[in-house]
Image (cartoon, rainbow, N blue to C red):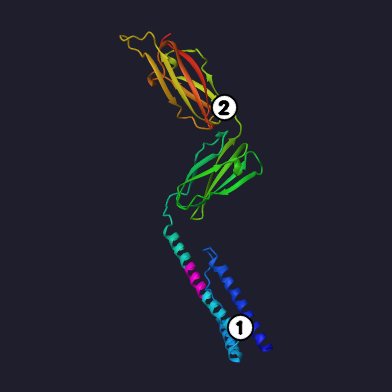
Amino acid sequence: MSKEKNLKNLVWILIVIILLTVSFIVYDKVLSVDKDITPLEPEVDTEVIEELEEKVEEAKDDDGDDDVKELEEKIEDLEEKVEDLEDEVEEKEETIEDNEESINEEAVVYSGENFIKVISPNDGAGFSTEPVEFTGEVSPNTDKIVVTVVAEGTSPPAVKDVYQLQNFNYGDESFVYRASTEWDNLFNGGYIYQFEAYFDDGGKESTEIYISYGVMENYITVDSPVDGKKFNINELPIEFTGSVSKNTTKIVVTATATNPKCVPDVVCTASINDVYTLKDFKHGDTSFIYRAKTEWGNLIESPEKNHYTFTAHFDDGSTETVSIGVNFFPYF
């Protein structure tokens, strides 16, 4: 019985070895998703199995013990599992090869210059609400985009956050990045956002913009001319200049006037009501210019004032207005 007991122990040890080997194959091949790992042929030492089978046969010849028969059945089950694992690993390797071929087939053919640029917001823009959304464009051969947030005026630069865009894919020609205090990439004060693009040829390009965030006083003022100033034809166009808070997104100017002396038999303009959004003003600008001239439909000759209302629109959706009136007499 001692000989049979030793044989059984040996059989169990060999089974454990096989199980460990199978576990290694599962971990290394079936559970691995890294396509860069060099495929290995999943193998269990067949000599070990054959040796185990021979020992079992010897034990059967000796006493035909039912326990030994049970061990033989376990060995057969192990052999079936190994075959199944080999099939799974082979399918996994075929999938990896197909993916690699697909990637190669979808490689972007691009002969232009590598580039990345931020479309919005404008450099220097201020924000009092969140999240702040950045949009931009890149050449289609871009592999990835990494955004680094740096505090303004720090030496060495104080890096606050580094993030690789997760929704950007190879071949995309545009990107979106959002910043929020909840995501730890938006902070009170002024910060520089650096956008770095990595290309499939190994090169990289970067661009950056500055924005500020925090509680801001929304305002708009007209600095010149003074209210009630008179202008003649030699002073056209009338130039209005003003100031706004840096979280101003746009400025709309409404020009209104009436000429009570304008009658049907006289060549004149009876009234105007012109609404115009400043084209040269960008979010982040803190000053603006607006011009008025009779030919542009925003100024008329009248004994009464031409009225101009300037409305600033801010990033939080609110508005502020300021008005001024001027007189225009062509000849005086």
Above or below 143: residue 264 = above
- Mainly helix, strand or loop, the magenta region? helix
Q: Nearer the viewer, mark 1 or mark 2?
A: 1
Q: Which residues are magenta?
A: 83-93
**In this orientation, does residue 11 appear?**
yes
* Mark 1 crowd level (few <14, some 14–19, many ≥20, 10 Å Cα): few
Q: How many marks?
A: 2
Q: Identify whether 180 is placed above or below 16.
A: above
The x and y percentages for residue 277 are 45, 27
**Mark 1 and 2 residues: CB-CB less than 8 Å, in contact?**
no
Tell me the residue at 54%/42% (across/down).
178
Q: Earlier in the sequence, mark 1 or mark 2?
A: 1
Residue pointed to by mark 1? 67
Q: Residue 259 in the image: state x and y as whole percent.
A: 39, 11
Residue type highlighted by circle 1: Asp
Q: Who is closer to the viewer here, 152 or 321? A: 321
Residue placed farthest to the left in the image? 265
Query: In which image quadrant can residue 156 be found?
Result: top right
Q: Where residue 236 sits in the image (x, y, percent)?
A: 43, 18
Corner quadrant of residue 126: top right
Q: Nearer the viewer, residue 80 or 35?
A: 80
Give the residue displayed 35% in from the left and 12% down from the top: 268
5 on left or right of 121 = right
The spot of residue 87 in percent (x, y) is 48, 72
Q: Which mark is residue 218?
A: 2
- Residue occupying the far right of the picture: 2
Q: Secondary structure at mark 1?
A: helix
Task: Look at the image and tell me in which quarter the N terminus lies.
Answer: bottom right
Q: Which mark is residue 192?
A: none
